[in-house]
């Protein structure tokens, strides 16, 4: 059971780190849009990974809870762990939704104000793809 507690603490730490991240919407407007969007994209990828890890952990707990040979004391511990994970799940989901709104707003703004021409958009897309590849968060 110590391994389960260690995994739970690791997930909680990862989720807390993402929730505590600076709100990317407060960055200065004058920054390079490729770097800014790459930052947002990489954060979104990290949040997605955290959501999937958390969902896997919660599914494992739920599956174990319904097994007929699981003792009552184990069920109580697992239910407590599941209840403890719920606020973190909510935080990660809310952060993901907020980040999606920021990304959509920023992209819409860039298209309307900076990348009006199709060629400009294609150049931006190519630069962004190269930056994401360089960072390894595609």
Image: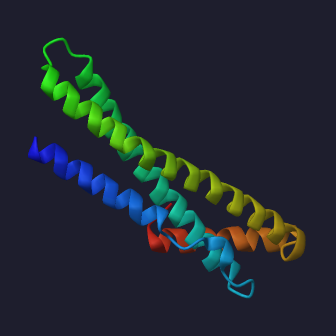
Does 104 sit above or below residue 82? below
Residue positioned most to the top: 68
88 or 39, which is in the foreground? 88
Q: x, y (%) of residue 16? A: 40, 61
Of the 4 image quadrants, the one containing the N terminus is: top left
Q: Residue drawn at (67%, 72%), measured in percent from left and top? A: 25
> Relative to 36, is 19 on the left or the right?
left
Residue positioned most to the left: 2
50 or 108, which is in the foreground? 50
| Colour convention of the picture | rainbow
Q: x, y (%) of residue 12? A: 33, 55
Does 121 sit above or below residue 44? below
Does 10 sit above or below residue 32? above
Does 30 sit above or below residue 25? below
Quadrant in the picture for residue 112: bottom right
Q: Residue drawn at (17%, 52%), measured in percent from left and top? A: 6
137 or 17, which is in the foreground? 17
Q: Residue drawn at (75%, 83%), measured in percent from left and top? A: 29
Q: Residue drawn at (35%, 60%), measured in percent from left and top? A: 14
Quadrant in the picture for residue 100: bottom right
Q: x, y (%) of residue 98? A: 64, 56
């Amino acid at each position: 059971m110590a391994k389960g507690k260690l995994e739970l603490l690791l997930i909680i730490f990862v989720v807390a780190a993402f929730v505590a991240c600076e709100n990317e919407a407060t960055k200065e407007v004058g920054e390079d849009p490729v770097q800014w969007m790459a930052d947002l994209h990489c954060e979104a990828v990290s949040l997605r990974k955290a959501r999937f890890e958390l969902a896997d952990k919660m599914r494992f707990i739920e599956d174990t809870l319904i097994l007929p040979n699981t003792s009552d004391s184990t069920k109580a511990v697992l239910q407590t762990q599941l209840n403890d994970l719920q606020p973190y799940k909510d935080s990660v989901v809310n952060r993901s939704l907020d980040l999606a709104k920021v990304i959509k707003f920023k992209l819409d703004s860039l298209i309307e104000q900076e990348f009006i021409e199709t060629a400009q958009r294609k150049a931006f897309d190519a630069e962004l793809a190269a930056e994401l590849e360089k960072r390894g968060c595609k």
